[in-house]
Image: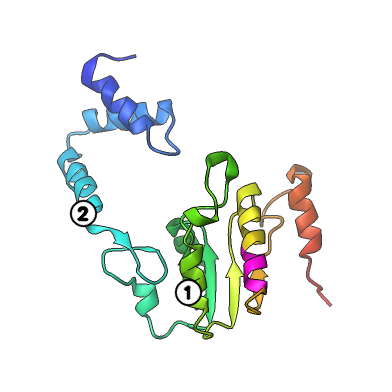
Amino acid sequence: MYDGIIQELIDEFGKLPGIGPKSAQRITFHVVQTESYNPKRLGELLAQVRDKVKFCRVCKNVTEAEVCSICLDERRDPTLICVVEEPKDVVAIERTRQFRGRYHVLGGAISPIDGIGPDDLSIAELMQRLASGEVQEVIIATDPNLEGEATAAYLSRMLNSMQIPVSRLASGLPVGGDLEFADEVTLGRAFEGRTKLS
């Protein structure tokens, strides 16, 4: 425990997701000890992000405009929609350079234990997008955990009634991983999603 403002700053950084007490302490001392670091710039950006960033009217991705650049890109395939949980998932998929369709960001996953149901996500907006009949396939790319699977199952049931082909991203063993360290669920999925070599 530190005195005064140092501890307050550590506590504030510690409220951010993924930052534990040691990381919060490390960041705080970086701010304090590094003369070239400009904390005022960080403060300005934090204030601006609240004012400028909004969610795309079409896909619910983060943007500073009414419609994001991906939705405006006419080179992307409008008949293919990839459904993800969060905007960070869009970035992860875009880094692969394998997907040339469009996205729909749910804003989370169904999690009864956290009080998040289907009505808390942008599922109704997704259904409105699909009602036009332009979309030929929906790829569900929710996280391969309990909440992501529940969300995928819910979406799959809803989309089956619309007779739109639905696929799910394959999951299994990571490249460079060892079989002995894989859990049963991951290994089971790897067997289910196996591909023929010849």
Q: Secondary structure at mark 1?
A: helix
Reading the image, the residue beneath label 1 is 128
Q: Quadrant of the N terminus?
A: top left
- Residue at screen point 64% across, 60% down: 154
Q: Amino acid at mark 1?
A: Gln
Whether residue 4 appears in magenta in the rendering, the answer is: no
Give the magenta range.
155-160
Q: Position of residue 120 (x, y in %)?
A: 48, 53
- Residue at screen point 22% across, 21% down: 5
The image quadrant of residue 31 is: top left
Compared with 196, 122 (above or below) is above
Q: Nearer the viewer, residue 61 or 29?
A: 61
Compared with 52, 198 (above or below) is below
Q: Quadrant of the C terminus?
A: bottom right
Mark 2 neighbour density, 10 Å: few (under 14) some (14–19) many (20 or more): few
Reading the image, the residue beneath label 2 is 51
